Amino acid sequence: MTKTIFYSSIMLILLASCNIKEKSDDSIKPLKKLSYHESYLLEISKLPVKENPLKDTIQMVKIRGGKFSMGGITNQAREDELPSHEEIVSVYWMDIHEVTNKEFKEFIDATGYVTTAERPINIDDVTYDPGALIFDETNPSMWWKFELGANWKNPYGKNSSLKGKDNHPVVQVSWYDAMAYAHWSGKSLPTEVEWEYAAKGNTQNTKYFWGNSFSKAIQHANFFQGEFPSINSKEDGFTKTAAVKSFHKNGYGLYDMAGNVWEWCLDTYYPNAYTIRDKREDGYFKKYFNKSQEKVVRGGSFLCAESYCTGYRLSARMSSTPDTGLEHTGFRCVIRE
C-alpha cells in the first residue's frame, strides 16, 4: 500500500482520539497541561512490573553488538531509507518472535490495563464507542476503515475472536499498548537501529535477510502474493496473520523479522532520520516534529506486496500514530545489557 494512503487513514483515527488532560496541583502557579501523549506515558509508568521480569531471557536471542550499514541499497529504496550509513549497536537481547495473543493476555490479566482500541473516543467532550482500523480491499480510495468493537481480542470487529490464535502475533495494539506491555515485562521496545541490525541476521548488503532473491520469499515471510489488494493467491498458505515460527528464522535465530505484522519501534518517525542522527537521544528519536507524533514501524506485514510497500525489505520503514490500532501491526521487545 502507498504511504500516502497509509498516512491519510491513520490521521482519521488520530483526529478522533486526541484528548487533553489537566494535571492538578495545589501550588499557586498552575502547572502546564499534560498532552494526551504525556498523560498516556505517565499512566504507563505507573503500571506494575512482573514480580519476576523475564531477565533470564527465556524465548530471547542474544544479539552481539557491532558496526553495520543501515539504510537502502537497492533501487526499491524510498527517500526515507537514505542515505545508507554506518551505525554501531551494543549487546542486547531480542524476543525470538512477535508478542503473541497468549502472552499479551497474561499482561492484561495481571494489570487490568485497557488498550487504546478499547477506550471510548472523546471529541470536543462528546464520547464515541471505541474501535480500531481494519483493511477494506473493496475501497481502493480508502483501504482502511474504522470498525466499532475492533481491538486485540476482536481484531476484525466485535463478531471476530482469537479462537485458535493463541500463538498468532497480537494485533490492534497501539504504540502505547506496546510500551505498556514492555514496561510490565521489564523490557523495552527496540530502537529502529536495533531492529534493523537484528533483522539483518548477520547478513551484509542484501535486500532481504535470506539474500537477494525474491523468489525465495514465501519460505521466509508471510506477505501478499497476487494482484494487490483484491486477489491473494496465498502461495505462502496464509490470508492474514500466521502463527509465530511458521517461517524460517534469520541468521540470529529470530522469526518473522519480515512479514506477518509490522512491529512498533521506540523511535519517533522522521522522514529524514538518517540525515539528522545527531538529534537522537539514548540511541533513538524521543522528540516529535508534529502533533501526530508518528512512531516507526518495521518489517512489513501480510498485506505487503511486491507491487506496493515491499515492507519485508530490510531497510523498509513506515510509520503510524501512537494511538492507532491496526489488524496488521504488533511488536516484540528487547533487553539491553
Image (tube, helix red, strand yellow):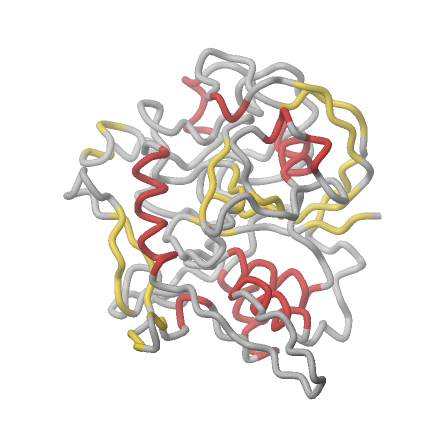
Task: Answer with left or right where residue 206 lies relative to residue 305.
Answer: right
Dividing the image into 4 quarters, which one contains the N terminus?
top left
Q: Quadrant of residue 195?
A: top right
Q: Quadrant of residue 51?
A: bottom right
- Residue at (47, 41) in percent of width and height: 319
User: In this view, which residue lies farthest toward the left?
Assistant: 138
Q: Is residue 146 above or below residue 9?
A: below
Q: Position of residue 197 (x, y in %)?
A: 68, 31
Q: Position of residue 200 (x, y in %)?
A: 63, 27
Task: Answer with left or right where residue 299 lies relative to residue 126.
Answer: right
Q: Position of residue 321 (x, y in %)?
A: 45, 51
Q: Is residue 314 above or below residue 238?
A: above
Q: Position of residue 142 (x, y in %)?
A: 22, 43
User: In this view, which residue lies farthest toward the top?
Assistant: 75
- Residue at (55, 77) in percent of width and height: 22
- Residue at (62, 83) in percent of width and height: 24
